[in-house]
Amino acid sequence: MAIERAGNHRIKVLAVFIGIALAFLSYEIFNKATYSYEPLIMRGWLDEKIPIISVFVVPYLSFHILAAVIVPLLSLKIGGYKAFLTNGISIIAGQCALDVAYGFFQTQVPRSPVSGNSPFDWILVHIVYGNDQPLNGFPSNHVTWSVISIIALWRLRHLAPRISWSLMFWFTLILPATVFLHQHFLIDIYGGIFVAFSAYWGTMFIIEKPKLGVVNA
């Protein structure tokens, strides 16, 4: 029975990672799509005052491997099977919610000229801008996956404090990176945070079934 259960767990773990890969693929499909209408520009007055700080390409580009692979593996190894399922499935559910927004309410972030000549400026122009179309703005995919990762790491902070706090700090840098690289507007961050919390806590209630009963004093 134990061997059979372990085998089922391995299959489900593999299925979750495949689901995460498909979730990322769905982002790419919407990002490369063409639309019959002009995507909305949700720029606020403060967005116009935010400068480009290209050094933020470092945390911005590290997001993929950290959110999709490293944190789910940490959740599995340190937090256990259910913590992993909550982490992984919330990423998939969150991306599904984002895809609905991208499909029915596509937005764009017009590119800003990059005047610097530093290595970070080159990476921003040729790697980030060169591969990512200025679409899929609201809510932010980077913010959604990063906040889900922060919540997952927060739950591991007592079991593995050093790596949990270090990665939480790093993921926190990804949020401002989205606007300092002019990949997103500020409203996109708010939307991404909302989707992340909704997806994670909704998934946790389904998988882990936490008890929220009132205890009489």
Image: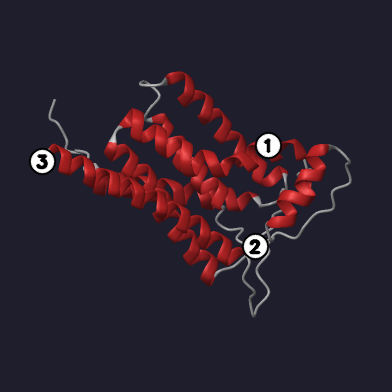
Residues packed near mark 2 inside 10 Å, few (<14), some (14 to 19) or many (20 plus): many
Q: Residue furthest bottom?
A: 36
Image coordinates of residue 64 in percent, x first then y, are: 56, 44
Residue type, numbered disc 3? Met
Image coordinates of residue 189 in percent, x first then y, are: 58, 48
Residue 213 is left or right of residue 47, and the answer is: left
**Quadrant where the image shows the N terminus:** top left
Residue 72 is left or right of residue 12, and the answer is: right
Q: Which residue is mark 1?
A: 58
Q: Earlier in the sequence, mark 3 or mark 1?
A: 3
Q: Earlier in the sequence, mark 2 or mark 1?
A: 1
| Identity of the residue drawn at 80% across and 54% down | 112
| Identity of the residue drawn at 67% across and 63% down | 108
| Identity of the residue drawn at 84% across and 48% down | 114
- From this viewpoint, is residue 67 visible? yes
Q: Which residue is mark 2?
A: 135
Front residue of 115 and 126: 126
Q: Which residue is mark 3?
A: 1
Q: CA distance from mark 2 to mark 3?
A: 49 Å
Local SS, label 1: helix
Camera-nearest label, 2 or 3:
3
Camera-nearest label, 3 or 1:
3
The numbered dot on residue 139 is: none
Image coordinates of residue 31 in percent, x first then y, are: 61, 63
**Quadrant where the image shows the C terminus:** top left
Camera-nearest label, 2 or 1:
1
Image coordinates of residue 160 in percent, x first then y, are: 40, 21
Residue type, numbered disc 2? Leu
| Identity of the residue drawn at 88% across and 42% down | 116
- From this viewpoint, is residue 198 visible? no
Residue type, numbered disc 1? Val
